Image (spheres, rainbow, N blue to C red):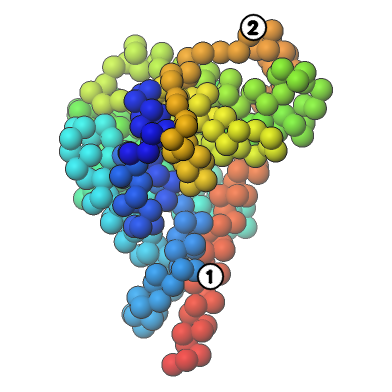
Amino acid sequence: MAHGLASLVASGTKAWLDSVDPDLIRSAIADGATGATSNPVIISDLIKTGRFNDSLPSLIAAGKDDADIAWTLVDELVTHAQGAFLETWKKTGGNDGWVSFELDPLLEDPANGLSEDERVARYVELGTFWSAGQCNRMIKVPATPAGIRALEPLAAAGVPLNVTLIFTKPQYIRARDSVWKGAVKRASLDSFKSVYSVFVSRIDVYTEQHVPDLSPAAQGMLAIVNAKRVWATNHAFWKTHPTPLQQEIIFASTGVKQKGLDACTYVSALAGDGIQTNPPATTQAAAEPSRSFSRQVDTMPPAAVLAELDTKVDMQHLEEVLMREGVEKFVTPQKALLALIASHRAAITAKA
């Protein structure tokens, strides 16, 4: 294991790969990764490499439409990743070794005409379907109004959950409460597992754009403060509601977006507990032999910085803006994946 990543893991952080690329999984496990997650961008990138050139013609010949092909490929890649992390899942008794399977982002596309009730029903239907018969597959559901409502019946049905697109503490609490309401309906909590993905870097992009009058000491600090507050809230809740397995925070979107920031700014500040799904470039930076990480997740900046952030930042507006942008970024890659498959279909059909 590379020195920097070894110290990150030693600090108490779990490292999950933000990819289900079989080649990356092999190297990531060697570097200490203990889980993985998938999304449409990852699948599109793998199609572009030509990895599926042999299987796409047969899938098309079998009469599958573009969406069916997309989900067949996702299922295949996630299943392979599950196999790679299965031993970790077994050794930890189900606390680690998970691979996240993202439900259809197009459920949140305003153009589909679905009501919120219809979205909820589809999340429950799809989450139950894609988790059936799986041991270390976690179903990824966005913390949208429909997604949050779907969490209770999914948790009650025994579905392991990764709640994604979380930007604020109130949003996390709504999601967690929905999960917990479902979990307590189960006959046993022995296999109950949930994680909550709080997005990091986009928070600081928001303050640069919408709160430019923050002092130099406070500008660029909200992402870290917000993530730590969500982590602390999660930690406190489960301390008073103990479960056999850990219910954890994922620190997602940890790649820096501002010029001049060290590549591991967020990795370092959030080290010590929870899960990090760091993008490849950030993981590479964290692996450098000169890197060393220690527990920082429960260390806050000075009180004056916290007071300024609390006074000047409208967290409700932040949530509204970032959720609107987040849903768009959630939907657009899925449309791009389907368009990519359609272009391959056209090329294959033209050659036939």
Q: Is residue 95 above or below residue 340?
A: above
Q: Secondary structure at mark 1?
A: helix
- Is 221 in front, or is 331? 221
Q: Quadrant of the C terminus?
A: bottom left
Q: Which residue is mark 2?
A: 303
Query: Is residue 31 visible to us here?
Result: yes
Q: Which residue is mark 1?
A: 340
Looking at the picture, how far across and down is residue 112, in whole percent?
A: 58, 58
Looking at the picture, how far across and down is residue 131, in whole percent?
A: 29, 48
Instruction: Kindly identify the residue that appears in the image at 40 percent across and 17 percent down.
Output: 235
Q: Is residue 21 above or below residue 298?
A: below
Looking at the picture, how far across and down is residue 184, in whole percent?
A: 29, 25
Looking at the picture, how far across and down is residue 110, in whole percent?
A: 62, 53
For label 2, the crowd category at 10 Å Cα-Cα, with few meaning under 14, some 14 to 19 and many 20 or more, is: few
Q: Earlier in the sequence, mark 1 or mark 2?
A: 2
Query: Is residue 199 visible to us here?
Result: no
Q: Secondary structure at mark 2?
A: helix
Q: Mark 1 to mark 2: distance in Å?
A: 50 Å
Q: Nearer the viewer, mark 1 or mark 2?
A: 2
Report the number of numbered marks.
2
Instruction: Kindly identify the residue that appears in the image at 23 percent across and 51 percent down.
Output: 83
For label 1, the crowd category at 10 Å Cα-Cα, with few meaning under 14, some 14 to 19 and many 20 or more, is: some
- Is 177 in front, or is 317? 317
Task: Classify residue 13 by image quadrant.
Answer: top left
- Is 54 in front, or is 167? 54
